[in-house]
Image: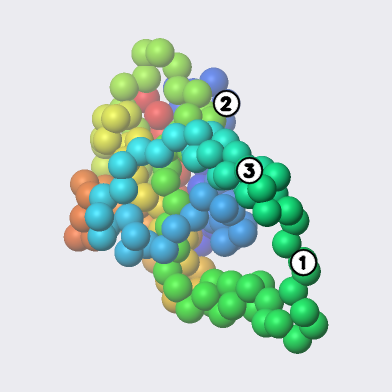
Amino acid sequence: MEIIVPIKGNVKYSLTLDPSVWIIDDRKKKLDEFFLNQVEERNELEEYTKAVSKHWDKELIEGNTAPKPPGTPKKKKYLKEELTTETYGINFHYFLRNSEPNEDATKVVVESSNGNQTFSIDEAMKFILCFSNKGKSLKEDGPIHVYYGNTKDNVITHVTAFNII
């Protein structure tokens, strides 16, 4: 099994996806969060700007906060425990946009050892790529699972490539 998945075909830039490094990507979410309350598309730059603004205002009004005393548990340890027990996914649109499909591209073919499935580019923008199950990489039926159609029931396993046509 290959652990990398290419985005190829009718794109300006062919990309190689390596799901083994997504565990440290800030764009990842717990898989259940994608399906609980169908999160609407967020403007991440706007959210970041608001957060920085809020922090800046707080420091101007209240001043800087003192460092935590020694012996205070670090969030990093909690995060490590969470990373090794949760199932995570990431939106496909980050990668599809970076590959810059050509203007005449209309379809995305998800190539899999179980057969190929074709979707429109708009449908593919809503894909969720699952890359870990309970903290473990998807070795038997991975390296990624593609969830489509806003439900956990529609899943493609054994994905080998994304071909833009």
- Specify few, some or many for label 1: CA neighbours under 10 Å numbering under 14, 14-19, or 20 or more: few
What is the number of callouts on the image?
A: 3
In the picture, the disc for residue 13 is 2
Q: Residue furthest top?
A: 103
Task: Give the camera-side residue of 147 and 88.
Answer: 88
Residue located beneath label 3 in the image:
57
Q: Tell me whether the residue at label 2 lies in contact with that at label 1, contact meaning CB atoms closer than 8 angstroms.
A: no
Q: Amino acid at mark 2?
A: Tyr
Mark 2 or mark 1: which is in front?
Answer: 1
Q: Amino acid at mark 1?
A: Ala
Residue 19, percent from left and from top: 54, 55
Residue located beneath label 1 in the image:
66
User: 107 above or below 117?
Assistant: above
Q: Amino acid at mark 3?
A: Asp
Q: CA distance from mark 3 to mark 1?
A: 17 Å
Left or right? Give the position of 20 relative to 33.
right
Residue in the image at 68% along x and 77% along y:
74
- Specify few, some or many for label 3: CA neighbours under 10 Å numbering under 14, 14-19, or 20 or more: few
Residue in the image at 40% along x and 39% along y:
42
- Ranked by sequence position, the earlier of labels 3 and 1 is 3
Left or right? Give the position of 115 relative to 6.
left
- Quadrant location, the C terminus: top left
Residue 85, percent from left and from top: 48, 78
Task: Give the camera-side residue of 126 and 62.
Answer: 62
Q: CA distance from mark 2 to mark 1?
A: 46 Å
Kindly state the secondary structure of the residue where label 3 is placed.
helix
Residue 106, percent from left and from top: 31, 22
Q: CA distance from mark 2 to mark 3?
A: 41 Å
Kindly state the secondary structure of the residue where label 2 is placed.
loop
Q: Tell me whether the residue at label 3 lies in contact with that at label 1, contact meaning CB atoms closer than 8 angstroms.
A: no
User: 98 above or below 84?
Assistant: above
